[in-house]
Amino acid sequence: MATSCSWSILIRMTFVIWASGVFLTFTLLLHLISALVAAYRCRPEAKLCRPTPVGSDISIVRPLCGLDHGIEQTLRSTFSTQTDADIVFCVASPNDNVIPLVRRLIAEHPRRNARLLIGDNRISVNPKLNNMYKGWVETTTRWVIFADSNVLMPPDYLERLFGAWKADTGLVCAPPIGCEPDGFWAEVECATLNTYQARWQYFADAVGYGFAQGKSMLWRRDHLEQGGGIDALAREVAEDAASTKVIRAAGLRVRLVNAPFGQPLGRRTAAEVWKRQVRWAQLRRASFPAQFAPEILSNGFAPLVAAAVFGLASDTSVIGMLLLTAAIYYGAEMVMAAACGWHLSWRTPLTALARDLATPFLYVQGWRDTGFSWRGNAMRVDGPERPATALSD
């Protein structure tokens, strides 16, 4: 009996060692591949530019709300783009404190076709989409770019967006790359945006499963009109999730620009970063639940757990396994960031570790919570079968 019990324990321990070892190897290998793909696509010399359509055939629509960090820098950069592109700034409230800045910038660039539209069209529960709506309606160009107010636009911004357009493309996007962080928690957000989210987005794009992201979206007007027009983007609480579904339904692809654009972060508090990450997790879960389900396995948390289990089961140093795994995982992220010219500091491994240790708590909140506040708007995500609804204040 004792021998039989010993053999049973040995078999179980052997299975645990084998399973944790295989899982650890697989996740580290996948991580290294995704980091390599992203580093290749996002390195500065990977810029792929293409001449933009001649004449006033492009509109840049920028929805604005309030004075975020670096807002003058990002809005001023709009005027560095192609000189014959229309620029449309959209503000929902006539009392928004960003309006004087926009009017001053327009006055400083009298040769640019730039204008400010004020008003709120309540076509959805998404305040950003409501704000963008008038920009779409008031433009007639073949190409329309929706760009958030906190995106930096280099002089070749348009050329790089068009450089990603191919025959099977329905939408070109660019994930935000955090820059100019001030403080530990801003660097945590940098680690989330850059070496985690952008890395996975470029990997997904490389295997033909790209997702839209609302920071920068290049639309060909007829593609969106055929998909139901801008009103179709109200089918999801997040307009980029709706955009992904519209393009895929048309049999087209969402593609990402090479060498994406920066988003100045400034100072962030722990509460601000946490609330933003919870909101994004809720939106991903509501729009793409099948993709959100395995998300807990997508960063360093899962391989670190596997390394600890392997160490315990195989009588190997747990501390040694954790240090080796962390060195491989976060070392790859640092090499990737360096290759891309993204933010790096002595705190980068610590901020990436903090990001990953928060994963199980963020994952639970993403499944459990349905309500959040966005730009002062109380909202509730009702799940993939029903649209989100606004909550009364």
Image: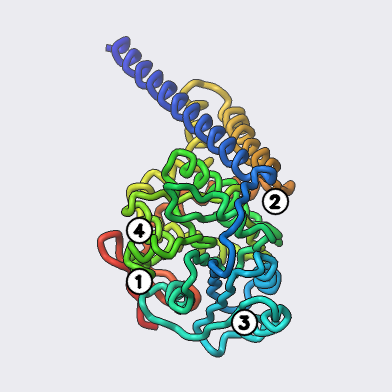
* Circle 1 residue: 231
Q: Residue 343 — which label?
A: 2
Q: Give the amino acid at mark 3.
A: Val
Residue 141 versus residue 155: which sits nearer the camera?
Answer: 141
* Circle 4 residue: 246
Q: Tag 3, which secondary structure?
A: loop
For the N terminus, the image quarter is top left
Q: Earlier in the sequence, mark 4 or mark 3?
A: 3
Q: Residue at x 38, y 16 (%)?
A: 10
| Quadrant assignment, res 184 | bottom right
Residue 256 location in percent, x, y? 52, 50
Check the image and report above or below for 10 versus 307. Answer: above
Alpha carbon separation for disc pair 4 and 1: 11 Å
Q: Tag 2, which secondary structure?
A: loop
Residue 294 location in percent, x, y? 39, 43
> Looking at the image, do the residues carrying marks 2 and 4 touch, with CB atoms under 8 Å apart?
no
